[in-house]
Amino acid sequence: MSHLSNPLATSDQLYRKSLNSLPEELQDSILYYTARLTQAAGLLLRLSQDITAQANVLLLRYFAVDDLLQYEFSDVSAATIYLTAKISASPRSLRSITNVYAYLLSSASKLSAIDKTSSVDPESYYLSEPNYILYRNRLLNIEGQILNALGFNTHVALPHPLAITYLQTLDAFTPAYNQKSKTAGQDVARRTIAYLNTALLSPQMLYLTHQPCALATAAIYLAARDQGVKLPDVEWWEVFDCEREELGFLAVGMQSLEGIVRRELEKWSGKGMITREDVKGEMRKLGKSLGSGMVEDEEAEMARMLDAKVTA
């Protein structure tokens, strides 16, 4: 059954996150924006959702064990999606990935909520050959660091297939299940998958603290409630190895993302993606120091300047 479970974050890793010199709100911003960027890149690279979802889980695992400010957030996202696609049946070239990220980080990106009434110059996301080589080498280096931090364990079990199996077990797709609508079961399934995909963007790192069976159960519970579909009166979630307390926690966590998104958009004025400089600027406003472990070295500073030229 190991292929149906995931290695979860340890208590030490979660405690380390709470001791980080970055305020919790800034940590949440980094996790949310990086996961959102990864999801958008997966769409533009035409990767299947399971590959993009696995990339986001690996991204969270890496951030749980390494310094959030070690590398530029967008670079970590690009390296993670390259790594995940490479070990799947749908690999993507570094050229394709760097082009997609150059676009997503440009002013032309649809991720930004800033008004784009004026035409956007395509040169704003053009990646020249020298800049591509620098970008490629940087991503390959980060890929190695991610693999090292994860102990070369890239296994990710997703709750999506389990959720469909659980719905079948509950007879959600049978005509006699619900007389309200002939498509009630399909509607619940679609809503369930939507909740699971949304949870990938949560800075609460739900995929690192709960097993796929619990995530699938909570998503089914919320989806059925949203669609007005009646589930069995008994404690059916226990059949799927999920306790009532865990179900309640996940239900609250999955529903909280809407408020988090509104908060982040207001905080960062609709930016498409935040950078390490943005985070450091917020720290300076708060009058706080990043600490000795988060000071950029000369090489990192040079990489940041090159990033600015690429996305300028």
Image: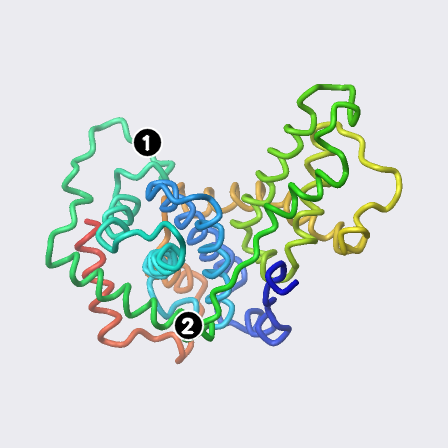
Callout 1: SS: loop
Q: Residues within 10 Å of mark 1 (few under 14, many from 20)?
A: few
Q: How far across and down, in percent of the image, does residue 208 sit?
A: 59, 62
Q: Residues within 10 Å of mark 2 (few under 14, many from 20)?
A: some
Residue 115's tag is 1
| Residues under numbered marks 1 and 2 in contact, where contact means CB atoms less than 8 Å apart | no
- In-front residue for pair 5/124: 5
Q: How far across and down, in percent of the image, does residue 79 sit?
A: 34, 60
**Residue drawn where x is 54% and y is 44% of the image:** 197
Tell me the quarter of the picture where residue 299 sits: bottom left
Tell me the quarter of the picture where residue 179 sits: top right
Q: How far across and down, in percent of the image, does residue 112 sit?
A: 36, 39
- Residue tagged by mark 2? 290
- In-front residue for pair 305/233: 233
- The answer to whether residue 169 is left or right of residue 276 is right
**Residue drawn where x is 64% and y is 29% of the image:** 186
- What's the residue type where badge 2 is placed? Leu
**Which scheme is used to colour this image of the protein?**
rainbow
Callout 2: SS: loop
In this picture, is 96 found above or below 109? below
Q: How far across and down, in percent of the image, does residue 9 sit?
A: 59, 68
- What's the residue type where badge 1 is placed? Asp
- The answer to whether residue 103 is left or right of residue 238 is left
Q: CA distance from mark 1 to mark 2?
A: 33 Å
